[in-house]
Image (cartoon, rainbow, N blue to C red):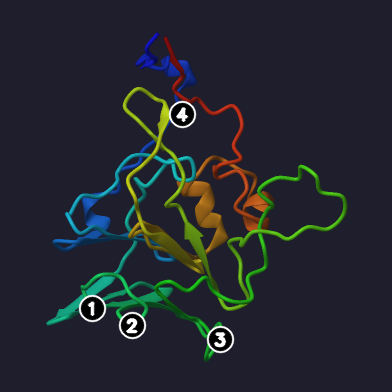
């Protein structure tokens, strides 16, 4: 007996409402990179050697169709800068690397530590949630959350599943991590993001109470989400 995948479109009442494609006015793009200014505090950073980028909704991010904030773009040979009210991105237009991509949190959060370089997880994170409480009896370590004493946090959306055209969850292409300053930035080159504003999670992810959003990224999706449709296989 040969196993085959049953391709059945998920009924509309079981499909989440999504708006995953960002508006063109929010996008700064080159041959191999795409930077989306989702809010003045939240960036999405993507790098792709073949120039293909992910526009489907993921378990973590359902909505990217947000009103673009005011921002400036400064371009010179080998250098791209994006400035919003709350952050300053500097990028050398090459493959994402610590020496070529950085985001500074504006507003005097810290004189020395409020600059994120690609690949950094960020120090002094205030913690988010635990992947599971199975087998836990007492205190346990927390995964990184959306708040940090240095004004930014990193959100890696590269391993979460994406929703396909039939409404099922499927593996996405290899993407890069995301960084977020607490006032808000995100980067995805697999899927990396940075944010400086935890409240941004309520506009890009599943609805959650504001208090939960500020405490941790729980409720925005992830591997621990329950009741999420997955395609079945059978004979």
In front: label 2 or label 4: 2
Looking at the rendered structure, the secondary structure element under dot 2 is loop
Tag 1 near tag 2, CB within 8 Å: yes
Tag 3 near tag 1, CB within 8 Å: no
The residue that appears at 47% across and 57% down in the rendered structure is 156
Q: Which residue is mark 3?
A: 110
> Nearer the N terminus, badge 4 or badge 3?
4
Distance of label 1 from label 2 (alpha carbons): 9 Å
Q: Which residue is mark 4?
A: 16
The residue that appears at 61% across and 71% down in the rendered structure is 148
In front: label 2 or label 3: 2
Q: Which residue is mark 2?
A: 99
Distance of label 3 from label 1 (alpha carbons): 24 Å
The residue that appears at 37% across and 78% down in the rendered structure is 98
* Label 2 CA crowd tier, 10 Å (few <14, some 14–19, many 20+): few
The image shows residue 176, relative to residue 12, as above or below, that is: below
């Amino acid at each position: 007996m040969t196993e085959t995948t049953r391709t059945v479109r998920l009924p509309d009442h079981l499909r989440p409402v999504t708006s995953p494609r960002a508006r063109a006015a929010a996008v700064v793009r080159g041959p191999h990179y795409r930077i989306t200014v989702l809010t003045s505090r939240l960036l999405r950073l993507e790098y792709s050697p073949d120039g293909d980028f992910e526009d489907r909704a993921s378990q973590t991010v359902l909505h990217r169709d947000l009103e673009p904030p005011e921002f400036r773009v400064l371009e010179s040979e080998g250098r791209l800068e994006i400035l919003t009210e709350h952050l300053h991105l500097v990028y050398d237009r090459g493959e994402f690397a610590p020496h070529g991509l950085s985001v500074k949190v504006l507003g005097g959060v810290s004189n020395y530590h409020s600059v994120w370089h690609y690949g950094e997880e960020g120090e002094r994170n205030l913690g988010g949630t635990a992947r599971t409480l199975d087998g836990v009896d007492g205190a346990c370590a927390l995964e990184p959350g959306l708040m940090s004493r240095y004004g930014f946090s990193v959100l890696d959306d590269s391993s979460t599943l994406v929703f396909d055209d039939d409404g099922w969850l499927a593996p996405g292409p290899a993407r890069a991590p995301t960084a977020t300053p607490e006032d808000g930035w995100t980067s995805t080159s697999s899927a990396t993001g940075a944010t400086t504003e935890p409240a941004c999670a309520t506009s890009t992810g599943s609805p959650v109470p504001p208090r939960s959003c500020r405490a941790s990224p729980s409720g925005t999706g992830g591997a621990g989400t329950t009741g999420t449709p997955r395609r079945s296989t059978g004979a």
